[in-house]
Amino acid sequence: MKNEQELKNIVKERYTKIAEQGKVENASSCCGATTPSTKVYNIMMDDYSETNGYAEDADLGLGCGLPTQYAKIKEGNTVIDLGSGAGNDCFVARHETGAQGKVIGIDFTPIMIEKARANADKLGYNNVEFREGDIDKMPVGDSSADVIVSNCVLNLVPNKKKVFGEMFRVLKSGGHFSVSDIVLVGELPEALKTDAEMYAGCVAGAIQKEEYLQLMLDQGFENIKIQKEKPIVLPDDILGKYLSRAEIKNFNMGRTGIFSITVYAEKPGKLEKKANKKGSEIQSKAPCTSNNGCC
């Protein structure tokens, strides 16, 4: 497998192209990066269209969950979205924070930042901003956020340990995250593991589910919970680019599972109460953490 910078360059190049594709094409492939499947269904994404704050122009069909639905965002919160793309999750989060809150989207692909800023301007949101940068070295100060969300992005970062460390750094004490991502149970065939297209497609970069959860524990997060889990089935017409018919059959009958999981975790401590402009208080206390550890 290539080194960290080479993998980042692959992802940046692919997602620059993906930004110009349509939602249907992105949704029928693996995160927009692989050859679209002839089967008419969304391989990874969940439907946002009925979600409050949804912005159709900002939905590129690249996610694998609905993390904002589970993120317990409150009015007045500061929310950071990792890998914000064209801004859809940020706009959904903004609906929850209200005008008194703040939403920061971070993405390292310049064209995605441009599209997101244009969408925010179109919507008239002056409390949603987009910053260009790597999520393993966030352009955000310490203890800045109440909540972090991310949708099918962490699997694209070679050094996931650094990302979880950065998430711990930028969250306030008592803050929490809810992220949707792709994880594995069992080993992928070598042809899938080493292919650049499958890496950019959110599959080859995925790690074992238990390892993923352990990284959160190692960085100090607690009260870790899987909020949602669903299997991801790769169509044979995509697998056929990498595997023979016999290998596809063995893969489909084997013990390897590809899953989208939405995971919640907290940074230890308690959030302080925050007064809004009308003088009332917004309670931002983190949930009880008496049952710590991986579930």
Image (cartoon, rainbow, N blue to C red):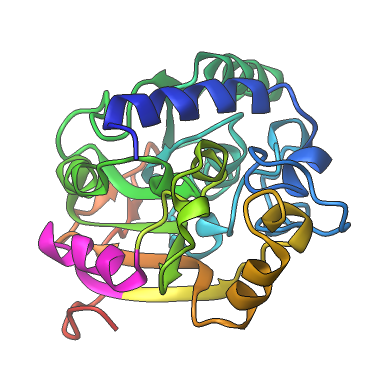
How far across and down, in percent of the image, does residue 75 sit? 45, 50
Give the magenta part as a residue range.
Answer: 208-224
Q: Residue at x 41, y 49 (%)?
A: 205
Q: Quadrant of the C terminus?
A: bottom left
Q: Residue at x 71, y 19 (%)?
A: 122
Q: Quadrant of the N terminus?
A: top left
How far across and down, in percent of the image, does residue 128 sit? 49, 28
Q: Is residue 123 above or below residue 102?
A: above
125, 291: nearer the viewer: 291
275, 50: nearer the viewer: 50
Label tally: 0
Q: Residue at x 68, y 59 (%)?
A: 46
Does the stretch in magenta take in 220?
A: yes
Q: Is residue 112 visible?
A: yes
How far across and down, in percent of the image, does residue 288 sit? 22, 78
Q: Residue at x 80, y 51 (%)?
A: 37
Q: Is residue 129 visible?
A: no
- Quarter of the image holding residue 79? top left
- Quarter of the image holding residue 86? top right
How far across and down, in percent of the image, does residue 179 sit? 42, 56
Instruction: Indicate left or right for 140 with 227 as reference.
Output: left
13, 76: nearer the viewer: 13
Instruction: Indicate left or right for 113 with 253 as reference.
Output: left
